[in-house]
Amino acid sequence: MSDPSNGYLYGDSCVFGVEVFVIKREPVIEYVCLKNFDVLHKRDWKIQNFSKLGDEWKCEEFCVGGHKWKICLHPKGTGEKPGRYISIFLQNVCSKSFKASFAICVKNQLKQPDKRAVTDHSFTASKNDWGWHSFIELAAINDPKKGFVVEDCFLLDVEISSVQDVA
């Protein structure tokens, strides 16, 4: 349902239809309330020439929940074990404080399981990014049988499921 190409979402709206069959002639009233419903925002990237990326790749800025974001990918890793893992972070470009729930996914192109991580984080002006230093091993990424890089192309997506301002 969250994939816009399926046609269920239009902007930030979704239309539901109901088909009712009446068996008894008794009035029944039911409703669904979607207030405070967290709309899932998803962005996908197809990163060409993955093997030629430098130490850092950043996507173009995008807006979700009234906040500006970027994805920061370190193809050779960061932290305590650089050169062993890929590092991926979601970065808040604004200076407001808020809490967000999100998932980052490295897509598998050979119909094997994707590598996905989900978390909640409170972003602040001083701590404006959150992610994983050891997201996935470089050995798995570079193994053509694993399907994460095909024809030097790498697929990445982020899903932001909620953004809540903090007072």
Image (cartoon, helix red, strand yellow):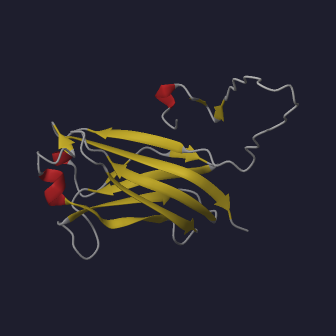
Task: Report the front residue among 54 and 27.
Answer: 27
Name the residue at 50% across, 56% down. 102
- Residue 110, percent from left and from top: 21, 39
Name the residue at 70% across, 26% down. 18
- Residue 107, percent from left and from top: 30, 45
Does 35 sit left or right of 130 as displayed?
A: right
Task: State the quadrant of the C terminus.
Answer: bottom right
- Residue 48, percent from left and from top: 24, 38
Q: In this rendering, is residue 157 above or below 85?
A: above
Name the residue at 66% across, 59% down. 164
Task: Report the front residue among 40 and 126.
Answer: 40
- Residue 96, percent from left and from top: 64, 62
Does 122 sit left or right of 144 as displayed?
A: right
Indicate the quadrant where residue 55 lies.
bottom left
Q: In this rendering, is residue 159 above or below 127?
A: above
Task: Report the front residue among 96 and 153.
Answer: 153
Residue furthest to the bottom in view is 80
Name the residue at 69% across, 23% down. 19
